[in-house]
Structures are given as C-alpha cells and as structure tokens.
Amino acid sequence: MVKTTGGFFSLDARGTLSDTLTGSYWKGINYIRARVIPHNPKSDPQKAIRGVLTDGVSKWRSGAISAADKLMWESYAAGQGMSGFNRFMHYYIQANYDDETQQKKTPQVIPSPQ
C-alpha cells in the first residue's frame, strides 16, 4: 500500500503502487522509480566470490589486519577516491579469487600494503 502526503508525485510517497512504481526517499530526497525484483544468482562462481568478499571483510574487522597495516592501506588509498578498506578488498579479491576457474583459492592470502 502506498502512503502519500499531498498526493502521488508531490510531497511524499512511500511504498509500491500496483507492482509497477515504488516511492521512497534517500538522504531526505523523495523519489519514484520503477519497481524492480532483485535477481540473486546462486551459481557456484557467485557463491565463491561472495565467500571471498565475506572472508576479506571478516579479516579487516576481526583484527587479522593490524592497526598499522590499516593505516598504511589508508595512506596507500589516499588521493585515489577510495578508502583503505576498499583498496585492501581490491587486492584481497585479486589474491584469493581465481578468475579462470571461478573459485576461491586456498589457503587464503592476506596482501600487504606495499
């Protein structure tokens, strides 16, 4: 059900109308877009890349990456339009995912910020 304030396409609209339009807001900006049903492939390559992403995030958050290394990743990423975490993940995925076989590599490699 769509809840509107001031009429549809005006001040405020939230929800989906007739499985075609969705009204919402983002950072205080109201918008209307076509309703999209997300596609979630569960293929083996997709599962592998998701597994590598999960592993990389857990390594960054769990303390497997030292504070000094995190600081180095941050300085390495400075001026490139990304964070140290993004830069780390870029290299982590390259080191732990095989594009040819589309599988996770084992054992896991933690790249150094050099």
Image (cartoon, rainbow, N blue to C red):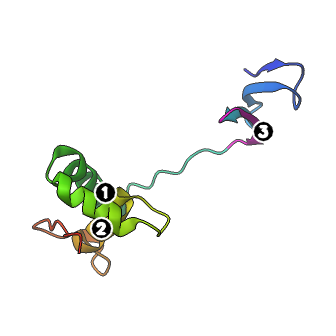
Neighbour class for label 1 at 10 Å: few (<14), some, many (≥20)? some
Q: CA distance from mark 1 to mark 3?
A: 32 Å
Mark 2 to mark 3: distance in Å? Answer: 35 Å
Say which label, 1 or 3, has the lower sequence index: 3
Q: Mark 2 = which residue?
A: 93
Front position in the image: 21 or 109: 109
The image quadrant where one finds the C terminus is: bottom left
Q: Residue at x 56, y 47 (%)?
A: 38
Which residue carries the number 3 mark?
32
User: Residue at coordinates 85% horizontally, 26% vertically from top-left?
Assistant: 11
Label 3 near label 2: C-beta < 8 Å? Answer: no
**Residue kind at label 2, given as amino acid type:** Ile
Q: How far across and down, in percent of the image, does residue 113 sit?
A: 23, 69
Counting from the top left corner in percent of width and height, residue 51 is at: 27, 56
Q: Which mark is residue 53?
A: 1
**Along the horizontal axis of the image, is 61 left or right of 32?**
left
* Residue at x-position 47% and y-position 51%: 40
Compared to residue 40, the image places residue 74 above or below, namely below
Q: Is residue 33 visible?
A: yes
Label 3: state its secondary structure: strand
Q: Residues within 10 Å of mark 2 (few under 14, many from 20)?
A: many
Contact between labelled residues 1 and 2, with CB atoms less than 8 Å apart: yes
How far apart marks 2 and 1 lie (CA) works out to 7 Å
Q: Is the N terminus in the top left, top right, bottom left or bottom right quadrant?
A: top right
Name above or below for residue 73 compared with residue 26: below
Looking at the image, residue 60 sits to the left or right of residue 3; the answer is left
Judge left or right: residue 32 versus residue 111: right
